Image (cartoon, grey):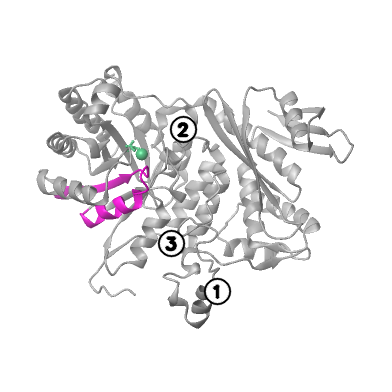
C-alpha cells in the first residue's frame, strides 16, 4: 500500500506512560514495575521516556534516577513545574542518564492562570524565562510545555513560546490538556506557531493530546501533518481521565498510511502487543477487546462474510498483519518435560531477557505450573513472567494459603503473610472464600482501604486455565489496582489484594503538588 518514494521524515515518539499514564486513578506502579516498563520502552525503540515527576514523591525521584541509570538508548526525561525546587530535583534525579531531558511546564490559558496559578501574564512570562534557563544548567535538552495551550489566547501563546525558545528550550510541547481541540484546530494551532514565532525552525514542536472527546490520536496526527515532529503518547492510551493518545495507534497509523503521512518512527512494532500486555498487567487496567491494534478482537474476523473474504485474500479485510504488531495467536509451546533450554528459547522469542536469578525463579514457577496445567501457551508464559515481575520486591507477600469452602461449610481462610520480613499467620471466616481471604489479609495487615473492584479473567481456554485477578482498592481518595495470576483463582485473588496493598504503600508517599503557586515559581 505504501507508494511514497522520497525519504521519510522521522517522528520522535515520547512515551509518558510512567508519568501521565501513572497519574490515572488506580494506575500506581511499584518501582520494579516502572523499571520493567522502562526496559520495555527502551527495547521498543521509544525516543524519549518520561520516567516520572521527581519532586512529587521520594518514590518518583527514585524511579526516575533508576530509569536514568539503566536505560541504554532512549533519552530519559523528568517532569518539573516552573519552580526552581522542582527543576533542581529533576536535574538531580537525571544525573545518571546518558541522555537527560528536563521537561518543565506552566499553564498559559486565562482560566488556568486566574484560578489555578493566580498569576498574571507578566509573572507567567517571568517564570517561563527563569525556569527554562534554570533547566539548561542541568542539560542542553530542555522541553517546555504550555499547559492548556489549546485554550490559550494566541498572541500570548506566541509570546510564551518565543520566550521559552530564547531562554534555551529545544522542544516546544503544545498540550491539549483537557482534550478539547478538534483535528483542524490543532493543525491550525501548530501551523500558526511555526509561522509566527521567531526562531520556530530551531526547535522541535511536539503534540500532547488528551482523549476526552476521543480525538487524541486524530489531533496528534493533525499536529504531525502541520509540522510537529514529536508525539507524546502512552501505551494503551492510559492517562488522566480519558487518557492520552495511544502510542500503538499513532505508530501504526503512521506505518500503515505512509501514502498520506510520509513519516516514520523508530518503533519496533512487533513488540507492541507485548508492551501493551505488560502495561495492562502492571497497572491492572484490562485492555478493552475492541481496542485498536492491541485489543483481543483487533484481528478477529467473526462474521461469515468476513471470514470468507479473508480465506480468499487477506487484504479484503486486513490492513495490517497481526504479526506486524506482535499478535501471534495462541500457540502450544511447552509442557511438563520441557527443560531450561526450551524455556529460555521461548522466553527469548517472546522478547524476555531475564537476569539469571529471575530466570531461575521463573523456571521453577513454570515447572510448578506445568504440574498443574497440561498445555502451556504463550499467554501462560507472559502471565507467569509478568506476575513474577509484579511481585518480586513487594514488602508484603503471601507465603501460604489454605481455604475451606463448599455447600454447607462456613468459608474460612488460613493465611500466612510476610510483612517487611516478619511472618504473620491467622485464620478468618467470611461470606465466601474470597471474603474470608480478604478478611484474613485485613487481620494480618490492618488498613482502611475499601474494595472498589474485583475482576477475574481466564488467561487461556480450558478449566485448568490460569486466572488473572485484579483488585482495586480505595483509601482517602487514592486508588490502586493490584493483580495476581495463578491456576487457582483463590490464590490469584490473595496475590492481587496483597499486590494492591503494596501499591498503596507507594501511593501514600506520593503527593502530586496541586499547582504551581506564585510562592513556588522562579527562585523559590
Ligand atoms: O496534559 C498536560 O498538559 C500535561 C503537561 C504536564 C505536559 O501533562
Ligand atoms: Zn497530560
How dense is the environment of label 1, judged by Cα within 10 Å: few (below 14), some, or many (20 and up)? Answer: few
Q: Secondary structure at mark 3?
A: loop
The mark that comes first in sequence, 3 or 2, is 2
Q: Which residue is mark 1?
A: 304
Of the two numbered discs 2 and 1 on the same chain, state the one appearing first in sequence.
2
Please rate how many residues cluster around mark 3, counting C-alpha atoms within 10 Å: few if below 14, some from 14 to 19, many from 20: some
| Residue sitting at x 41%, y 43% | 243
Image coordinates for residue 477, horizontal then vertical, percent: 51, 25
Question: Observer-nearest residue: 254 or 230?
Answer: 254
Instruction: Identify residue for label 3.
Output: 268
Q: Marks 3 and 1: in contact by CB < 8 Å?
A: no
Q: Are marks 3 and 2 in contact (CB under 8 Å)?
A: no
168 sits left or right of 283 in the view: left
- Marking on residue 60: 2
Q: Is residue 223 above or below residue 400?
A: below
Q: Left or right of 245: which side holds 25?
A: right
Residue 157 at x, y percent in the picture: 17, 36
Q: Which residues are magenta?
A: 201-227
Q: Along the line of sight, which residue is nearer the eye, 109 or 513?
A: 109
- Label 2 neighbourhood size at 10 Å, few (<14), some (14-19), many (20+)? many
Q: Residue at x 55, y 68 (%)?
A: 302
Label 1 sits on a secondary structure element that is: helix
Question: Can see residue 162?
Answer: yes
**Residue drawn at (53%, 61%), measured in percent from left and top?**
297
Amino acid at each position: 500500500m505504501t507508494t511514497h518514494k522520497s525519504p521519510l521524515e522521522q517522528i520522535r515518539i515520547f512515551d509518558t506512560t510512567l508519568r501521565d499514564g501513572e497519574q490515572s486513578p488506580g494506575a500506581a506502579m511499584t518501582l520494579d514495575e516502572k523499571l520493567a516498563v522502562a526496559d520495555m520502552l527502551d527495547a521498543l525503540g521509544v525516543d524519549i521516556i518520561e520516567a516520572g515527576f521527581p519532586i512529587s514523591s521520594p518514590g518518583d525521584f527514585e524511579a526516575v534516577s533508576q530509569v536514568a541509570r539503566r536505560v541504554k538508548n532512549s533519552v530519559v526525561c523528568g517532569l518539573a513545574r516552573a519552580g526552581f525546587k522542582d527543576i533542581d530535583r529533576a536535574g538531580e534525579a537525571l544525573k545518571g542518564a546518558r541522555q537527560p531531558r528536563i521537561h518543565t511546564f506552566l499553564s498559559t490559558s486565562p482560566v488556568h492562570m486566574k484560578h489555578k496559578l493566580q498569576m498574571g501574564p507578566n509573572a507567567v512570562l517571568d517564570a517561563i524565562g527563569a525556569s527554562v534557563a534554570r533547566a539548561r544548567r542541568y542539560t542542553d535538552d530542555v522541553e517546555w510545555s504550555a499547559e492548556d495551550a489549546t485554550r490559550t489566547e494566541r498572541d500570548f501563546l506566541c509570546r510564551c513560546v518565543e520566550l521559552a525558545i530564547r531562554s534555551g528550550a529545544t522542544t516546544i510541547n503544545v498540550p491539549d490538556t483537557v482534550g478539547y481541540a478538534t483535528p483542524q484546530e490543532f493543525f491550525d494551532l501548530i501551523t500558526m506557531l511555526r509561522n509566527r514565532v521567531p526562531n520556530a525552525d530551531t526547535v522541535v514542536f511536539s503534540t500532547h493530546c488528551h482523549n476526552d472527546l476521543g480525538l487524541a490520536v486524530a489531533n496528534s496526527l493533525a499536529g504531525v501533518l502541520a509540522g510537529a515532529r514529536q508525539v507524546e503518547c502512552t501505551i494503551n492510551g492510559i492517562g488522566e481521565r480519558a487518557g492520552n493518545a495511544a502510542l500503538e495507534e499513532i505508530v501504526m497509523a503512521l506505518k500503515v498510511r505512509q501514502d498520506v503521512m510520509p513519516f516514520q518512527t523508530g518503533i519496533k512494532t512487533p513488540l507492541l502487543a507485548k508492551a501493551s500486555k505488560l502495561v495492562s498487567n502492571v497497572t491492572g487496567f484490562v485492555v478493552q477487546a475492541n481496542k485498536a491494534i492491541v485489543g483481543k478482537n483487533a484481528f478477529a474476523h467473526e462474521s461469515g462474510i468476513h471470514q470468507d473474504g479473508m480465506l480468499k485474500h487477506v487484504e479484503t479485510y486486513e490492513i495490517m498483519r497481526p504479526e506486524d504488531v506482535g499478535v501471534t495467536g495462541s500457540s502450544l509451546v511447552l509442557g511438563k518435560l520441557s527443560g531450561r533450554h526450551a524455556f529460555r528459547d521461548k522466553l527469548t522469542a517472546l522478547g524476555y531477557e531475564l537476569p539469571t536469578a529471575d530466570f531461575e525463579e521463573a523456571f521453577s514457577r513454570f515447572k510448578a505450573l506445568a504440574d498443574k496445567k497440561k498445555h502451556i501457551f504463550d499467554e501462560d508464559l507472559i502471565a507467569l513472567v509478568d506476575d513474577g515481575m509484579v511481585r518480586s520486591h513487594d514488602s508484603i507477600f503471601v507465603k501460604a494459603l489454605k481455604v475451606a469452602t463448599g455447600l454447607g461449610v462456613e468459608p474460612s481462610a488460613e493465611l500466612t503473610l510476610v510483612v517487611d520480613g516478619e511472618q504473620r499467620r491467622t485464620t478468618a471466616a467470611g461470606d465466601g472464600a474470597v471474603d474470608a481471604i480478604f478478611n484474613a489479609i485485613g487481620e494480618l495487615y490492618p488498613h482502611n482501604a475499601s474494595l472498589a473492584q474485583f475482576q477475574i479473567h481466564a488467561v487461556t481456554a480450558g478449566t485448568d486455565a490460569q486466572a488473572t485477578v485484579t483488585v482495586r482498592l480505595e483509601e482517602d481518595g487514592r486508588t490502586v489496582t493490584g493483580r495476581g495470576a495463578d491456576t487457582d483463582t483463590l490464590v490469584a485473588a490473595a496475590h492481587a489484594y496483597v499486590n494492591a496493598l503494596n501499591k498503596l504503600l507507594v501511593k501514600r508517599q506520593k503527593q502530586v503538588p496541586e499547582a504551581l503557586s506564585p510562592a513556588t515559581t522562579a527562585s523559590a
